[in-house]
Image (cartoon, rainbow, N blue to C red):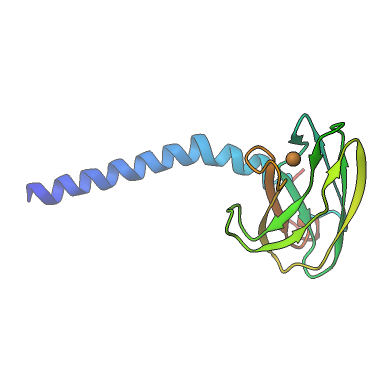
């Protein structure tokens, strides 16, 4: 009896903790990147400055090749854009953009990807230059578009 109710208390505690964490940590992060990042054509843009990307979210439509215009503003510093299935050193790489020493802009041509969530990063500085690539039908084509 006592043991069962203790266990139930623990479950309640964990549920409350997770809910609080989701509200405080996950929800703002999700709403900031995911809802603002939906595909808008097949010409994507990203820049690097002070060894940071200007966005942590890119989006492309599924099943069609797209381009990424990459503007490396860091003079004398080399960056690139690499796309993989997950943000993990062992994850399968789907696109490995050529190294770009700034200041210089290049246009990467990326092959069609299936709908899903991918990771992009600078392969030279993945720890602080990475983000999410969302491949999905644009939100504007559904009626639930946010303002
Ligand atoms: Cu870099």
- List x then y, in percent, for residue 135: 73, 60
Residue sitting at the far front: 76
Q: Residue at x 85, y 53 (%)?
A: 40
Image quadrant where residue 129 sits:
top right
Quadrant for the C terminus in the image: top right
**Is 129 on the left or on the right of 3, as rendered?**
right
Q: Is residue 77 above or below residue 111?
A: above
Image quadrant where residue 83 sits:
bottom right
**Is 3 on the left or on the right of 39, as rendered?**
left
Viewer-proximal residue among 42 and 110: 110
Q: Is residue 11 above or below residue 73?
A: below
Q: Residue at x 15, y 47 (%)?
A: 5
**Is 52 on the left or on the right of 17, as rendered?**
right
Viewer-proximal residue among 147 and 110: 110
- List x then y, in percent, for residue 27: 56, 41
Q: Residue at x 49, y 38 (%)?
A: 23
- List x then y, in percent, for residue 41: 88, 57
The answer to whether residue 145 is visible is no
The answer to whether residue 131 is visible is yes
- List x then y, in percent, for residue 138: 78, 58
The quarter of the rendering in which ligand 1 is drawn is top right
Viewer-proximal residue among 134 and 129: 129
Q: Residue at x 35, y 45 (%)?
A: 15
Residue sitting at the far top: 50
Residue sitting at the far left: 1
Image quadrant where residue 134 sits:
bottom right
Q: Is residue 42 above or below residue 35?
A: below
């Amino acid at each position: 009896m006592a043991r069962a109710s203790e266990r139930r208390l623990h479950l309640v505690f964990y549920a409350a903790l997770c809910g609080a964490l989701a509200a405080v940590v996950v929800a703002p992060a999700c709403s900031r990147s995911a809802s603002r990042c939906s595909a808008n054509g097949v010409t994507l843009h990203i820049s690097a400055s002070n060894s940071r990307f200007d966005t942590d979210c890119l989006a492309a439509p599924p099943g069609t090749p797209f381009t990424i215009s990459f503007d490396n503003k860091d003079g004398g510093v080399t960056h690139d854009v690499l796309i993989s299935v997950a943000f993990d050193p062992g994850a399968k790489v789907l696109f490995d953009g050529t190294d770009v020493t700034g200041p210089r802009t290049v246009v990467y041509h990326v092959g069609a990807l299936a709908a899903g969530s991918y990771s992009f990063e600078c392969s030279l500085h993945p720890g602080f230059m990475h983000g999410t690539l969302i491949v999905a039908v644009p939100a504007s084509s559904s009626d639930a578009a946010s303002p």
